[in-house]
Image (tube, helix red, strand yellow):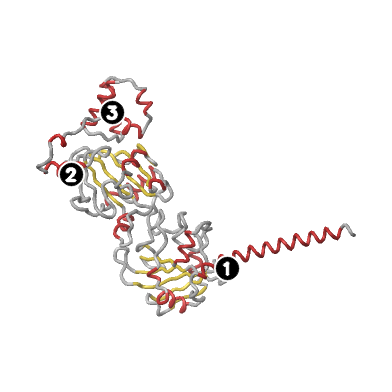
Amino acid sequence: MLRKFPVRIAILVVLGLALMTTALVMAENDDVARDAVAQDPDLPGADGAMLLDYVLNQNPYTDWGSWTADRWTDFDAFLQSGAPHGETVRIFANHIAQEGVMADGFDGTLPYGSIVVKENYGGTVEAPGELAALTIQYKVEGYNPAAGDWFWVKASGDGSVIDAEGMVEGCINCHGQDGNADYLLRYAFGEEPVVTYSDPLPAGDGAAILDYIINTSTYTEWSSFPAQGDLDFSGYLASNSPHGSSVRIFVNDRALDAIARDTFDGTLPPGSVVVKEGFEGTVDAPGEVAAITLMYKVDGFNPEANDWYWVAATADGSAVNVEGMVDGCIDCHGQDGNSDYLLAYDLPEGAMMGDEMMDDEMMEDESMDEEMMDEPALDGEALVAQRCTTCHTIDRINNANYDRAGWDSTVARMEGYGAQLDAAERAAVLDYLASR
């Protein structure tokens, strides 16, 4: 008996310590949950009238902002929607919700005190019309653990009439579909949401992106960048290698909507797509499209180069020549002075002049010395290293042994695959290859 007694005491001590540890962890978790609420001690209770007064008068929701854009939805704008929220919505999230998402270690569950307000409209995204209704979800600790503790309210647009509040089954059932993150229907914290109400953007994959811009959201129906100075991006523009002698540029609505905002900071949001058609002819007579190059911002793809995913493809988009983190694209578009890797469009202040426009202005200056206008000799070896190694290694080129006619045929075949060379550059490349 004397030997068993200490063992029992030891067991009790261990159990006691375990219970104390569990209690401390639970208390810490409770503290974390309440920390968010402590940021705003004036938060209302689970009551529709109190909540509406809070979001309309005490802390106006229109000052909050919304979720960070992801690959599927840009929340800082009107959004296409559907029943029961009308044809168009606009979403606002309070600072507790936004900071919760951005916090280190965020596990996909919003903190207590989070409020999401959805404005409901009967019109289209372009012409939403008058505000028809407000729907709100508010996370209140202990309110309804079976449904994420969300308190729901649906009210008239001015908040004067409450149509439904509390544990609203329709809200819970719709927002609680498998795949939704913490009862959020359109925002899945970086994952594809269950509902987008529009064509979801593609993954970072060349074939998928080309299919999207050709078949899902036809890029030729997009607009281009707003005009800047003397550059009108709605038409053909003078260009140079590797994009051909002239180009035409198209930009998707996500990028254009961002540029138009008063809060735009000069960096395009995830999901932005810029498509450039390359032509061998002049601006006045461009001829047929020779190749397509595009840049697509994929959140988290390559932060060192602003997350741009690059694709160079054939004119019809049927074949990808190069894609991903393309060094040539990054190095050229990443030159000092370019804005967010855009070579001809400076966000948000003004366009950089292309070489041809610069030459025209220089030639008009009567004091320009003729020697300054002479074109330097082209370096064929450098051109080969720059243009040809985007698709294969330099060793493959060095190991080939053709005469000039053979190289001429090979270069022509590469141009068919999308290689961009003007007449002078082509001649310099042939001279170098044939002389080795």
Residue at image coords 18%, 43%: 358
Q: How many marks?
A: 3
Q: Outermost residue, left direction?
A: 366
> Could you say which is closer to the camera, residue 191 or residue 264?
264
Q: Position of residue 328 (x, y in %)?
A: 34, 38
Residue at image coords 13%, 37%: 369
User: Which mark is drawn over residue 188?
Assistant: none
> Could you say which is closer to the camera, residue 331 or residue 171?
331
User: Please, what secondary structure does the residue beneath circle 1 have?
Assistant: helix
Compare marks 3 and 1 and give the one earlier in the sequence.
Answer: 1
Compare marks 2 and 3 and give the one earlier in the sequence.
Answer: 2
User: Which mark is drawn over residue 411?
Assistant: 3
Badge nearest the viewer, 2 or 3: 2
For label 3, count other residues whose C-alpha is less than 10 Å away and answer few (under 14), some (14-19) or many (20+).
some
Q: Quadrant of the C terminus?
A: top left
Q: Is residue 368 above or below residue 186?
A: above
For the residues labelled 2 and 3, the Cα–Cα distance comes to: 29 Å
Residue that badge 2 annotates: 357
Residue that badge 1 annotates: 145
Q: Amino acid at mark 3?
A: Val
Badge nearest the viewer, 1 or 2: 2
User: Please, what secondary structure does the residue beneath circle 2 have?
Assistant: helix
User: Please, what secondary structure does the residue beneath circle 3 have?
Assistant: helix
For the residues labelled 1 and 2, the Cα–Cα distance comes to: 65 Å
> Could you say which is closer to the camera, residue 394 or residue 124?
394
Q: Position of residue 306 (x, y in %)?
A: 38, 48
Q: Quadrant of residue 119?
A: bottom left
Compare marks 1 and 2 and give the one earlier in the sequence.
Answer: 1
Q: Position of residue 232 (x, y in %)?
A: 20, 51
Q: Quadrant of the N terminus?
A: bottom right
